[in-house]
Image (cartoon, grey):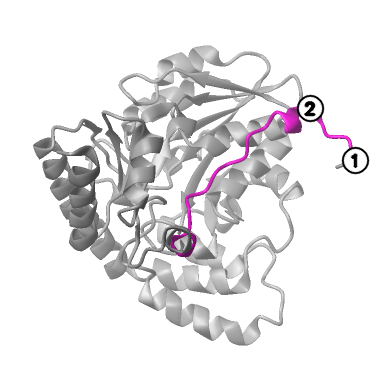
Amino acid sequence: MKIPLLQHIANLSPYQPGKPIKEVERELGLKNTIKLASNENPLGPSPKAVKAAKMALKEINLYPEGGGFYLCEALSKHFKVPTDWIILGNGSVELIEIAAKAFIEKGLNSVMSEGSFAMYKIATLAMGGEAREVKMKERTHDLKEMAKAVDKNTRIVMVANPNNPTGTYNPYKEIKEFVESLPESVLVIIDEAYKEYITKKDYKSAQDLIDKHPNLLVLGTFSKAYGLAGLRIGYGFGNPELLKILHKVRSPFNTSLVAQEACIAALNDTAFVKKSVDLNTKEMAFVEKELKKLKLNFTPSVGNFILIDLPISGKEFFEKLLREGVIVRPMAMSGFPNSVRVTISTRKDNKRFIAATKKVLNL
């Protein structure tokens, strides 16, 4: 290619998505492959959302409502947040990228934890900024050390709570103290993509803090518990003055008409979300019990996935499991070269994963 490339882009490693099932089956001549790599809802999408999406298809000759007016109204009602305190993204990951566009450039930095969602680093580096990764404490965000890493050139601090890929979390009290300790000149992003799955009493959403902290953006998504990953809609809660800045660099019509209508319906499908969470709680206990029998170490998780440590590299385990028709996620890119992240699925799929693990590790 003859087009001169910016050096910070040349040095950037792109996010690597998990392999699609059809491609794995084509390459290896397999059938009935199961995918446990992307933390998708094993129950599929909310039935109410599917019905609404089908109805919306009749109007896809029209542009969607640019700011997602009706979905913001539904989110406002559901979460008790004013509509002008809500912004939508093409998945919550787009909101991370929008924030980086708005606040990061060469000479400025973002602070994040090692072993957290890879897109925090990628979004920062893509804007020419410095990604400051702070070591974890027992595979959990070390908020005190992250606060110490903030300096006059820090513009964004990003916290995944719960964290992907470790599945750990910081209690609400710690998050509150952390937000209060940071200067108002720093945007604090609390990414709560897996919040629906948490049953811990000392956890709650940081959305309760946005009133007092105009520099706080709290993210959520429809990709996990609502089962709508393929529609790509996330949302953020924050002060209207902050959101006005983010809207300046948000692409017009960044969420589709079909997705908006499906998400409105999904918010009303509380029975589906409860079923998804109950299944995850039950099956997480089953998987943990089976891993203990195999004497494999893992990080206790509050999400819909689990990080498992192996006697071989995560890449080698991933490749061997592929040949058994089971797709998992090796986590070297997040700093765990001998670990894989595995989505918690149905009992049938979870049993198949355990059986395949026994076989490839000779346990």
Q: Please name whichever residue, 194 or 183, is drawn nearer the observer in this view of the structure.
A: 194
Q: Which residue is mark 2?
A: 7
Q: Is residue 23 above or below residue 120?
A: below
Q: Is residue 314 above or below residue 352?
A: above
Give the alpha-carbon distance from disc 2 to disc 1, as whole Å: 14 Å
Q: Residues within 10 Å of mark 2 (few under 14, many from 20)?
A: few
Q: Which residue is mark 1?
A: 2
Where is residue 56? Give x, y as percent: 56, 81
Where is residue 196? Give x, y as percent: 33, 52
The tag earlier along the polypeptide, 2 or 1, is 1
Q: Amino acid at mark 1?
A: Lys
Q: Is residue 149 left or right of residue 194?
A: right
Magenta stretch: give its range: 2-23
Where is residue 241? Give x, y as percent: 67, 42
Q: Please name whichever residue, 172 or 288, is drawn nearer the observer in this view of the structure.
A: 288
What is the magenta segment's predominant secondary structure? loop
Q: Which residue in the rendered view is the most extreme toward the front?
A: 29
Please tell me in which quadrant of the rendered image residue 308 appears: top left
Q: What's the residue at 14%, 38% (across, down)?
A: 363
